[in-house]
Image: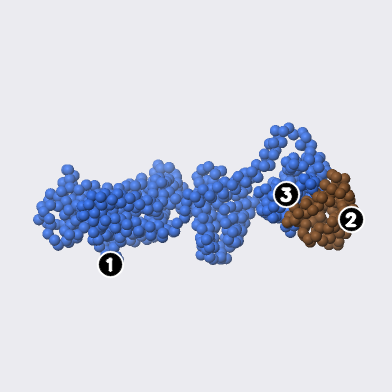
Amino acid sequence: MEKMAIEGELSICRAEELKRELLPLYETGRELEIDLSGVTEMDGAGLQLMVAMKIEAIARDVRLSFTGHSAAVMEVLDLADLVGFFGDPVLITRQ
Amino acid sequence: MNLDEALDTFVAEAEELLGNMEDALLGMKRGSAAEDAIHAIFRAAHTIKGSAGLFGLDFVVGFTHTAESVLDLVRAGELEMDAAMVELMLEVCDHLGSLISLVRQGDLPDADLQGSASLLTARLQNYLEKNNPPSLPEVEAAGVVSDCWHISLRFGQDVLRYGMDPFSFIRYLGKMGRIVGMHTLTDGIPRLSAMDPESCHLGFEIRFESAADKETIESVFDFVKEDCRIVILAPHSMIEKYRILIEELPEDDMLLGEILVKCGSLTQNELDAALRIQASAPIGEVLVGQGMVRAPVVEAALEKQKQGRDAKAGEVSLIRVDSSKLDRLIDLVGELIIVGSSASLFAQRSGVAELLEITSSMSRMVEEVRDTALSLRMVQIGATFNRFQRVVHDVSRELGKDIRLEIGGAETELDKVVVEKIADPLTHLVRNSMDHGIEPEAARIASGKPACGTLKLNAYHDSGSIVIEVSDDGGGLNREKILKKAIEKGIVAADANLADQEICQLIFEAGFSTADKVSNLSGRGVGMDVVRRNIQDLRGSIELDSVEGQGTTTRIRLPLTLSIIDGCQVAVGKSSYVIPLDMVIECIEFEGGQDEAGQSGYLNLRGEVLPYLRLREYFEVDEAAQKRQNVVVVQYAGRRAGLVVDSLLGELQTVIKPLGRMFGGVKGIGGFTILGSGEVALILDVQRLLQQAEEREQKNSGRNLTIMEESRS
């Protein structure tokens, strides 16, 4: 299993950089696990990136899971109502 | 531009707009093109509200808002602009006018104004309420069940690059209401390897519960509306609108429909209905349907664009300039003329051909500069005339007479200062004509005239002056009554023998009124003399023509400009005088002998009797007369006379400088000017001289002219 942690901002500022870092992971063909616990900030670009990763994984028939969603990630996923789309187990916090 | 200046601009603009609004309202009353007028009225209200909002003038915004809502309904054809509403809108216009003048003074409305504002608002509200009930159930009948807004968003590709986060808009939206359901569209997002991570591929369907209005919701997306597809459907929108939404968006119809159902904006039944309509509607109808929904939106967008363009075009072709700058320019041009003429004089003396040539082309240029500079100050009198539509409208209502205003010569141009100063005397004349001139309806019908009285304002140019006429088709002046009253008041001697024309002029005497009853408009006997004084201050004159039973015409004659004229320079002894060239008809040699006594007399001008005035005697010049003398024949207001002078010195441009207060009483002199040589020349007041030439001539013939005595100036 390939593991990677995204730290800091998951946003437009680093979108290009993250894409470059993430894409090679698929080449191994192994299961991917992305740790989001270190994400401090997330915007629309970050969300798109997550969705694109998921779609890429489905297209390549690779298992991809996100783990340890930080509060910043959860806030966006809740807002976009996309928690179900990713299907990853998340910790539901009481608002 | 600081805030104060901006506020000044706002006030000036608002006043202009209110003027337009009033014109349009009065135009509607007379039955002119209603649709244009309604648009003009609405735009005026809308723009004033908008600009007032920028300055935080809440009392203006609040009041205008209600009026605008009513006008909007009228514009949409849901309300009819009837006579009662025109009257109401005129009152609204007036109220706005007083609010704007408060803004100018930096005050807030007092209790009185607030009171009248709430009265007006209540009357406006009446219209709004009257209109609402019938339209509401209709909407509900075909609308969807959902009582929430539905917002459909497709962000443009570059939104993220511009540093905007789609979620920040949604979070902001959340502050204005409650996002009941939201679906994020992920279909637009490609797989990671094919994706440009900086482009935005997001779309949202949002069910939104809020009390805010559409405009407010739209304003959330102001920053991105350029490159995003935003559709906002009101609560209980027609299924039809959802159908079009589904159809217009790029996503698969069925999928989108399901999303809408998931959001809760549509029920399954409604979705089915929408899709059924879609399936059965032929393409043409669909397009029409689209057109129908888009029309108001497109129209609004076009309107906005057009307004922007209009405003821009206006900015390009018009510049607001402080009038004191123009005055300064004209002063400078005046100085330039004086210096220029002294240069030509010097060139002539030197006899250097090249110098002469240069100075002559220079003086031609100076002349052009002068004309252009003066034309900067010229405005058409039409705007001033149009203001009287309102005066006539109000006064005729007050008097209970039906009076129509006709305007002629609106494009006649005259000096801005004159236009401003003429407005008051003109108002007085108009009111006077309406009150005293035009008879009550019954009397008009009895004397065989049309029931509706006519008041005419006319302007035209005539021998270097502008003539403004106020005429009515009323009863005319009753000469006997005037004479009786004048004798009663001791204005003329009881045995005075007066010409008709002279009797008419009596009404300009101080303290004169023949009206049997004093109304609050006129008849108090102050006024006509004030009118005459105002006009004389502008170096003008006023006269009256009246045919009993047919009407009265008051004619105001004013000089075209107040500062620079072409003149004819003449000499008497060693001093120079300037006669305005516009008034000079011809110059002839004087054949009368020098030893003839008296200041004035007659001469024979090709068989015509011409009264003349010797300037030497008139101005008491001591030097002995020359052997040969000349006569300058001048004409003013249809009267002619000769002025006897020693020599003719030719044409020149003259800057009129006013005489000091000390010389204010000097008769026959209108001002002075500085000649090229540096000497001072006096400018003759031809009007006054003519009058005196006539008076003296009449006195000599022994007629009683008590009232024409100069003392009343």
Residue depicted at x 78% and y 40%: B253
Residue at the far bottom: name it. B662
Q: Amino acid at mark 3?
A: Ser
Q: Secondary structure at mark 2?
A: loop
Spatial CA span between label 1 and label 2: 102 Å
Asked whether residue A60 appears in the rendered view, the answer is: yes
Spatial CA span between label 3 and label 2: 29 Å
Depth order, front residue of B6/B515: B6
Residue on which the image places disc 1: B662
- Rendered image coloring scheme: by chain
Among numbered discs 1 and 3, the one appearing first in the sequence? 3
Residue on which the image places disc 3: B199
Depth order, front residue of B5/A11: A11
Badge number at residue A89:
2
CA neighbours of label 3 inside 10 A, class few (<14), some (14 to 19), many (20+) = some
Subunit of mark 2? A
Which one is in front in this view, the residue at disc 1 or the one at disc 3? 3
Q: Position of residue A81 (x, y in %)?
A: 82, 53
Asked whether the beta carbons under mark 1 and mark 2 sit within 8 Å of each other, the answer is no
Q: Position of residue B581 (x, y in %)?
A: 26, 50
Q: Secondary structure at mark 3?
A: loop
Q: Are marks 1 and 2 on the same chain?
A: no
Letter of the chain shown brown in the rendering: A
Q: Are marks 1 and 3 on the same chain?
A: yes
Q: Amino acid at mark 1?
A: Met
Q: Is residue B460 left or right of residue B292?
A: left
Subunit of mark 1? B
CA neighbours of label 2 inside 10 A, class few (<14), some (14 to 19), many (20+) = few
Residue depicted at x 84% and y 51%: A25
Letter of the chain shown blue in the rendering: B
